[in-house]
């Protein structure tokens, strides 16, 4: 036989387009349309309907970017139309706001209300209909339409004016294309779904497959039987022609898919936070309308923040969600406040994502999530398995690592082992998407791609349009029904993620193990983009820790009221701003300007809490015995002040830093550290008390380096390896000055200019400071940044033979190689660190702490003298043009501390000290620490009151050095018991701790995280 497959498929495509799809809707009925344009920000239904609506025609241009228009649609239904609508049809309102139907979201969206304010469902490009009640002879509906701009467009990554209301053009974006009543011919619609499923499956089957040929001939016969001039009258014959191929059951070895309804809605990205609230209301309403029609439909939804928004702004939606959860159709998943970034948040913040999220779900719905759900975050920290497990969760899901540029993850179902040895059962859906439409191509890809074939048979597929596309559709549910048991296709069952994980773990308990971080070989620029957002995050993480410490101490010691509500709100704001497109710096300008404002407000609140608490502890400054006190919130002694305590400031004798000039520049000597700052601003020499030089010979010293930063795609997200090939050293000019402070510290100030001939050059001022008796060099960079598509790095070429570097992560550190032995090593050319890097060879190292940046890279070279230079480079600032064309422009201040002859313990202390400087105050009362650890390796991360309002004290501790550690925990609080708990402060089985002499002994494995409840 001749191969006529292409001809039959071409015929099928055209017949669908020209005859079947147009026949889905019949008996069109006109409607009357009027509209009210909201002046600026959205308003609720009750306010909108009070305004005057003006008639508008089809073709009416509406909606400048980010604006809202309310449409009022009415129609008088004739008895004849009602009668025809009731015969084999479903009456609907068909809506086209003028969007691009080839894309499911990212453009105009709508939410429909009945006249009494009851929500109906959402409107989106691929879900553009509303049900019509034909028991009444008048139809009336209000539609809130959002004129959201398609910021990304075709992903050309051109600079866009649409990132802010004030910069967006005033011209309307949309033209009202279609708005009428019609009857959906259910039989025709069902046939189209049959064809869509079979066509998709057929295309994925091998050319020589008998099943492929059977489907092709059945489809061909179907077309022969349908009269294009009478589709309605002949549709049953076409349906019958496909019955046989649709009834053929799947083979016993067919891959199994558990499909769960889902809508991945970024809490902010190419739209502001306020628009996400509306996206959630629209999508959630749509999901629940599907539940009403399809009892088998299950919808999985993460992010407690999005539920909280519904409770606050859309209580009607929240009430219905509560009902659907009780009915088992709606499943909260993830247990986090938002789907956060996992690389950059600090340890306590990462823990609080689960504490806040799980507590909300438990209190509101009585539901405990067991699966961490992060399908779209940009890589996954090696500390995450322990945090997930300590939160009481068993499983983890993502698919983002399928975006890797170089290496393919070897597993789809596996055990993931974290830095402390904790393992959690993990799944990467092999469908490689979290917005599946359950197409034949996607299901076939899931089966072909599944790495565990022969060992496991089950994978998970999240289906539904995300980001404003409206979530799952009736077409997707139809596809699931047709592929439940269909020859050639995986078997599809709709269910909840927990069902999948229970079955998958039972089927494959001996799954392989992946140890350490799951690094995304893409989006490496997110460790640096939008520094103000990152600085706000780092600052407020430190202030939250300090505010909780001093507020708890004030409550316990002097009975001050504990600001639980203020702290909760501050935490929730910080957690929201750690969302995986906010903290990474990959959102539009509106999002980041708002993030900066919210961070500033949190800073003000926390500073006030700290000041109030310290004042309550110290007593009045007017007290006759008042004196200068120092509050030390860190876990290391600082200037004679014990950890976590308030003590009288020691009377330190005046000391000086020796300042001399040399051929290399200015020499600063504290008596412990000796530094040479070159005329050009380079740190040319750095020696500790042992006299060993830290700066590699022949390197020229630590310096700033400017690179071109032109990624192939994803401007704010990506840092491509080729940036390294163009570099300019940033050297200071001649206007150097030296300043001496009252405490004897000396600062060498140098100034460099980039683009001096431009109207707005970049000016970088370096302040290199050495304090009397200090063991470290302080570097401060004041950068007035006006670059475009550049990245500036601070490079430290060190005379250290380091095989790897230790980079702080949550509750510990990770070691990453300095070499590129494998493709995995080479692809990790930019990585994440928190407050410190430790670069060491056995017995000697250098610690470098920073206060706001996350990205770094490292390499190792062999010098002519045979020695090894290990160079670490901190990424300070970028200047991508999309999606925020003004990203990071303006003034920034970054601080570093560098200590030679440093241990990993020194690095931990240096990082915490830079984040939480001591505070001076005047008062009469010293305050001892509530709790202390005898072993410096065991860090007291958090001291707070219990979430249940019991006034018990909660202490979070972790082992920070990567060693086994025994410690005595001294508890200086009246107590009745000490109990080990999980992160949600629930007692662990066997968690009672033997306490004696005001404390207890605890043993820690490397990087172990523990929570201790002091029962008062």
Image (cartoon, helix red, strand yellow):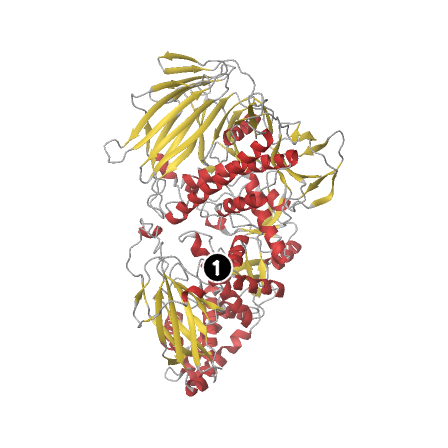
How many other residues sit within 10 Å of disc 1, few (<14), some (14-19) or many (≥20)?
many
The one of 876 and 7 positioned closer to us in this rendering: 876
Write down the residue under mark 1: 280
Across and down, in percent, residue 102 comes to 37, 64
- Which is nearer the eye, 252 or 115? 115
- Point out residue 776 in the picture as x, y percentages from the top left corner: 48, 21
Whether residue 255 is visible to the viewer of this picture, yes or no, is no
765 relative position to 745: left or right = left
**Along the line of sight, which residue is nearer the eye, 754 or 963?**
754
Residue 515 at what x, y percent from top left?
58, 41
Q: Nearer the viewer, residue 559 or 586?
A: 559
> Based on the displayed image, in which of its 4 quarters is residue 552 positioned?
top right
Callout count: 1
Where, quadrant-wise, is the N terminus in this rendering? Answer: bottom left
User: Does the rendering let one see residue 968?
Assistant: yes
Q: Quadrant of the C terminus?
A: top right
- Secondary element at image label 1: helix
Quadrant housing residue 384: top right
Question: Taking 795 as reference, is 786 above or below it?
Answer: below
Residue 575: x and y in percent read: 52, 46
Q: Is residue 799 above or below residue 360?
A: above
Position of 485 relative to 364 (above/below): below
Position of residue 425 in the picture relative to residue 745 (left or right): right
């Amino acid at each position: 036989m001749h191969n006529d497959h292409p001809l039959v498929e071409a015929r099928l495509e055209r017949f669908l387009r020209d005859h079947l799809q147009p026949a889905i809707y019949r008996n069109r009925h006109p409607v009357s349309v009027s509209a009210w344009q909201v002046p600026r920000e959205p308003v609720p239904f009750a306010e909108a309907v009070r305004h005057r609506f003006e008639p508008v025609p089809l073709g009416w241009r509406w909606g400048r970017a980010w604006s809202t228009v309310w449409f009022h649609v009415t129609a008088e239904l004739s008895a004849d139309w009602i009668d025809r609508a009731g015969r084999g049809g479903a009456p609907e309102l068909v809506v086209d706001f003028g969007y691009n139907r080839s894309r499911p979201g990212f453009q105009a969206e709508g939410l429909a209300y009945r006249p009494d304010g009851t929500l109906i469902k959402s409107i989106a490009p691929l879900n553009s209909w509303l049900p019509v009640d034909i028991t009444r002879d008048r139809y009336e509906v209000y539609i809130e339409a959002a004129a959201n701009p398609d910021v990304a467009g075709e992903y050309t990554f051109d600079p866009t004016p649409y990132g802010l209301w004030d910069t967006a053009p005033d011209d309307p974006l949309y033209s009202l294309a279609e708005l009428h009543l019609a009857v959906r011919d259910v039989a025709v619609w069902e046939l189209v779904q049959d064809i869509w499923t079979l066509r998709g499956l057929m295309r994925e089957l091998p050319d020589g497959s008998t099943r492929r040929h059977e489907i092709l001939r059945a489809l061909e016969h179907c077309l022969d039987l349908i009269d294009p001039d009478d589709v309605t009258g002949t549709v049953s014959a076409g349906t019958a022609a496909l019955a046989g191929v649709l009834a053929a059951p799947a083979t016993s070895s067919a891959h199994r898919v558990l499909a769960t309804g889902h809508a991945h809605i970024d809490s902010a990205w190419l739209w502001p936070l306020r628009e996400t609230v509306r996206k959630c209301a629209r999508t959630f309403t749509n999901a629940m309308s599907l539940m009403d029609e399809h009892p088998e439909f299950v919808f999985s939804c993460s992010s407690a923040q999005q539920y909280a928004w519904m409770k606050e702004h859309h209580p009607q939606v929240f009430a219905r969600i509560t009902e659907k959860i009780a009915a088992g159709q709606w499943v909260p998943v993830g247990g986090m406040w938002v789907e956060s970034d996992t690389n950059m948040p600090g340890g306590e913040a990462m823990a609080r994502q689960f504490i806040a999220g799980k507590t909300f779900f438990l209190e509101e719905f009585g539901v405990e999530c067991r699966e961490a759900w992060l399908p779209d975050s940009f890589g996954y920290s090696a500390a995450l398995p322990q945090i997930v497990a300590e939160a009481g969760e068993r499983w983890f899901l993502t698919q983002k690592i399928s975006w890797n540029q170089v290496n393919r993850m070897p597993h789809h179902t596996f055990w993931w082992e974290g830095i402390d040895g904790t393992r959690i059962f993990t799944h990467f859906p092999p469908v490689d998407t979290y917005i599946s439409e359950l197409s034949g191509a996607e299901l076939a890809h899931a089966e072909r791609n599944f790495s565990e074939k022969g060992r496991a048979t089950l994978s998970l597929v999240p289906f539904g349009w995300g980001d404003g596309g409206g979530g799952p559709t009736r077409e997707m549910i139809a596809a699931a029904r047709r592929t439940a048991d269909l020859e050639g296709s995986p078997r599809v069952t709709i269910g909840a993620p927990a069902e999948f994980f229970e079955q998958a773990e039972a089927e494959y308990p001996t799954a392989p193990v992946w140890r350490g971080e799951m690094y995304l070989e893409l989006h490496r620029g997110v460790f640096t983009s939008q520094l103000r957002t990152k600085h706000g995050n780092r600052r407020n993480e430190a202030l939250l820790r300090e505010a909780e410490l001093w507020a708890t101490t004030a409550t316990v010691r002097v009975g001050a009221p504990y600001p639980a509500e203020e702290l909760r709100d501050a935490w929730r704001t910080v957690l929201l701003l750690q969302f995986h497109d906010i903290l990474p710096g990959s959102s539009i300008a509106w999002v980041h300007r708002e993030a900066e404002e919210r961070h500033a407000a949190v800073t003000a609140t926390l500073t006030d809490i700290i000041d109030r608490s310290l004042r309550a502890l110290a007593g009045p400054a007017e007290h006759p015995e008042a004196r200068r006190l120092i509050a030390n919130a860190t876990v290391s002694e600082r200037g004679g002040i014990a950890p976590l305590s308030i003590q009288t400031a020691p009377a330190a004798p005046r000391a000086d830093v020796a300042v001399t000039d040399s051929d290399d520049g200015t020499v600063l000597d504290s008596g412990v550290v000796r530094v040479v700052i070159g005329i050009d601003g380079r740190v040319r020499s750095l020696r500790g008390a042992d006299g060993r030089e830290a700066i590699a010979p022949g390197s020229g010293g630590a310096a700033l380096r400017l690179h071109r930063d032109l990624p192939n795609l994803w401007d704010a997200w990506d840092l491509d390896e080729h940036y390294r090939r163009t570099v300019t050293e940033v050297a200071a000019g001649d206007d150097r000055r030296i300043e001496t402070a009252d405490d004897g510290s000396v600062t060498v100030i140098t100034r460099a200019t980039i683009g001096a001939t431009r109207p707005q050059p970049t000016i970088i001022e370096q302040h290199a400071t050495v304090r009397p008796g200090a063991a470290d060099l302080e570097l401060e960079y004041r950068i007035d940044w006006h670059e475009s598509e550049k990245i500036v790095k601070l490079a430290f070429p060190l005379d250290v033979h380091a095989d790897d570097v230790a980079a702080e992560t949550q509750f510990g550190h990770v070691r990453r190689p300095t070499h590129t032995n494998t493709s995995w090593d080479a692809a990790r050319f930019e990585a994440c660190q928190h407050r410190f890097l430790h670069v060491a060879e056995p017995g000697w190292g250098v610690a470098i702490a920073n206060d706001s940046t996350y990205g770094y890279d490292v390499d190792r070279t062999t010098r002519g003298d045979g020695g090894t230079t290990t160079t670490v480079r901190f990424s300070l600032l970028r200047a991508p043009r999309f999606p925020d064309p003004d990203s990071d422009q303006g003034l920034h201040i970054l601080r570093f501390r560098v200590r030679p002859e440093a241990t990993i313990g020194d690095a931990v202390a240096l990082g915490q000290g830079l984040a939480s400087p001591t505070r001076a105050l005047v008062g009469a009362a010293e305050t001892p620490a509530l709790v202390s650890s005898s072993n410096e390796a065991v860090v007291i991360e958090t001291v707070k009151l219990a979430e249940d309002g019991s006034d018990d004290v909660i202490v979070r501790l972790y082992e920070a050095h990567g060693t086994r550690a025994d410690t005595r925990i001294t508890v200086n609080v009246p107590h009745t018991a000490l109990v080990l708990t999980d992160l949600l402060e629930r007692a662990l089985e066997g968690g009672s701790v033997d306490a004696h002499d005001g404390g207890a002994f605890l043993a820690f494995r490397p990087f172990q995280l523990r929570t201790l409840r002091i029962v008062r």
